[in-house]
Image (cartoon, helix red, strand yellow):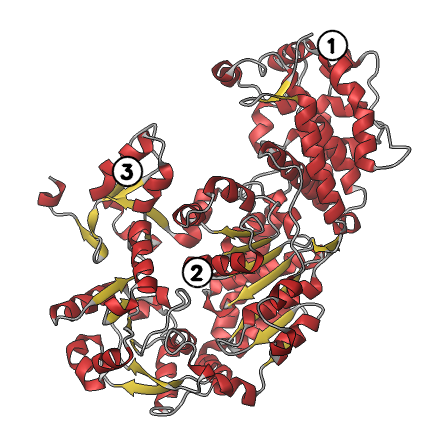
Amino acid sequence: MKLCYAKFNPHQFLECHTLDAINVLKSLKNSFHWLEELSPRIFELSFYAVLLHDVGKCASGFQKSGLQRKRWGYRHELLSVPFVQFLDYGEREKNIIELAVLTHHKTLDELDPILPLGGEELSPEFYEKIEELLERAEYLERMFIPRIPNMEAYYFGTKRPPKRFKLPLDWRERLRDFDFQALKEWYEEHTNNERLTLTFMRGLLNASDHLASAGETSIALLPDIGERLELKIPIEKLRPLQIKASQHVGNLILRAPTGYGKTEAGLLWANKNAFRSEGKIASRIFYILPYKASINAMHRRLIGLFSDPSLVGVLHSSAGFYLYSSSLEYRRLGSLYRKIYTPLKVTTPFQLMKAFFGVGFHEMLKTELAGSLLIFDEIHAYEPNVLGIILAMLEEVAPLKSKVMVMTATLPDFLEDLIKETLPFGELKAPPEEADQFTRHRVHVIDGSMDSIEELIPELGLYQRVKDTSRSALIACNSVDRAVATYKALRENGFRVLLLHSRFTHGDRESKERALLERMTDYDFVVATQVVEVSLDVSFSTILTEPAPLDALIQRFGRVNRGGWSEGKIEDVYVLTQGSEADRKIYKDYQVVEESVKILRELDGKELKESLIPELVSTAYSEISKKLTEKVQGYKKLAKEVFNSVKPLKGGEDERKFYEMFNGVEAIPSTYAGEVLKLLNRGMGIEAYRYLVPIPIWLYWAEKENFHRLSDKGIGKHVLVAELEYSPETGLSKEPLSAGDIL
């Protein structure tokens, strides 16, 4: 009897892999019980999809050794689908299961050119491969199919399991006669009515198959968050809003000062609103932040709380390199974080948007988002286009039994109104007397710009402050060019300076951030762009910043005297009245910047009371709030149209285009091209990532002639090289390499 393997290296029999996948599905069934309310019998139908999804692998061509199997090149799913007809179900149920099996690797649009839609004359390859499959008919009849009743009994846990699979005597002939055309037509006719069920079917099958292939036989659940937090914060020390958040059921907006403990409030809210299974949290929790640095910091913080990196995931475009550089098990963890396995994930909103733009296995992510808890921290930090997409996303997940919490210290009224119009929200705000306990800053408005940095340092006593406190002072610039010029000016005056902005390689950026965290006293000044607004957990002695929107300035102030509220200590912060010409491109609604400076002038020399901040931020945006509201609503409408165009089992936006749309691109400075090619040839792609630099999309298009691929074909063909000047000291320049540098 010829054997049938579902997996190779190591070899795994078909029934063994199938049972592993059934174990995962059973774990999902026991945990994600709300899916049955959204789509009745979903776990029953999914069982049979998992049961039959890999039967087509018994074809002799698939059973060949590695290279021969690749050359065989036929889709085993096409051979698995015809077995579904032997289930004792009606047409609807069979078609739903058949479509899930058919698309568990490729989407319908990808499979369409090779679907066997005619007889043997039109689709000879299908009939040929069916004959290959039947070469192992004895294995199926004696080894796999006799085990199905036991699998049914194990999964359904009843004394009388369904016993839906019944192999007829003429099964060989009926495999050949399967009607793919009828299946395709049924899909086109019923897609809209069956959208949710088809989504969950593919999502559950993908989740079960992928986790089983990764060696997992169940999903992880999160322990009670309240019990974990109590080990760090006794109940009697919880703040009023943290207690109220822990008792609130439903969507929630929380406004509280920086340092109040919003993260703990968010986790306690999630603890209250989560679906549970066997006393543990079954709902998937997504903690959503705007910047990678803050995501990485939150990931480390939450691992400290739960003491298990497999329970707390991190999702962003460079998460793999972050895990690698953090000495974590990056291959296994990176794989688990992209699956349903991990119960709590810290992520950018872009990762969640992929589900609604139809990127990748979007049905699996949508299945995970059902019944989930979404915690948005610092939602005000996004551009109108991203805000519009986020609001459209919230409307999509609400019917899926998901709940949302929005947390911020600086939420303009117009944005709060937009959020409340999207979904019903409860609201918690720190009362003025409580908020003012967190006041830490005294504001000074300084006429002038960074062009006069050499005069401003002694005039404001910034260097003296550094010497008195043994802590660096922060110099915040709005653009990379201004930051580099300021850095050079300070260096020429003999100061010890660290430069931090977005156009360093990942490796150099990591080294600089580590130096700042571990050796802050080595520097008199840290010159940084907006990357410092909500990133590193460091406390500077003071700040001199270019003008910016008030909410951004508040975030920058938050890098100064971070724990000062606990001692009642107030530190001076300085805001310049003039920026550079680039600022009007960075802050397109520059009126907000001008209004912010005007507001702060009225507070010149006074303490910035935390209770005033929400009103001040709203005032800064008041003149353009209507315009911004219309922008956000416009993008929301466009996003809804895109979301509605995405169909289950079909693909949507190309993933690379999706990332370019929001994140720009990444490239290697040409000075490192040779080193990167060596690393790629040695199979050390994760080390090569160290040399990538994020490139804003505007810079890419402005200098497109100075970008090329590392190689025309083979290894490195997708890696972009920037023929621009690069220095580990100052980062990537907008200037092309000179002829001498190229030679």
Name the residue: 57% across, 35% down.
214
Local SS, label 2: loop
Residue 606: give its label.
none
Residue identifier under label 1: 138
**In this view of the protein, can residue 53 be seen by the observer?**
no
Q: Quick one: 151 or 638, which is closer to the camera? A: 151
Q: CA distance from mark 1 to mark 3?
A: 51 Å
Q: Residue furthest left?
A: 740
Q: Quick one: 293 or 253, which is closer to the camera? A: 293
Relative placement, left or right, of 313 versus 222 is left
Residue 291: give its label.
2
Local SS, label 3: helix
Q: Is 621 drawn above or below residue 106 in the view shown?
A: below
Relative placement, left or right, of 490 versus 602 is left
Q: Quadrant of the C terminus?
A: top left
Q: Mark 2: which amino acid?
A: Tyr
Q: Is 552 drawn above or below residue 691 in the view shown?
A: below
Q: Quadrant of residue 579?
A: bottom left
Image location of residue 80, percent across then percent down: 68, 23
Q: Mark 1: which amino acid?
A: Glu
Name the residue: 38% across, 78% down.
561
Residue identifier under label 3: 676
- Pick whichever of labels 2 and 1 is earlier in the sequence: 1
Image location of residue 358, percent across then percent down: 56, 45
Image location of residue 468, percent across then percent down: 26, 81
Q: CA distance from mark 2 to mark 1?
A: 56 Å
Relative placement, left or right, of 354 versus 208 is left
Q: Mark 3: which amino acid?
A: Val
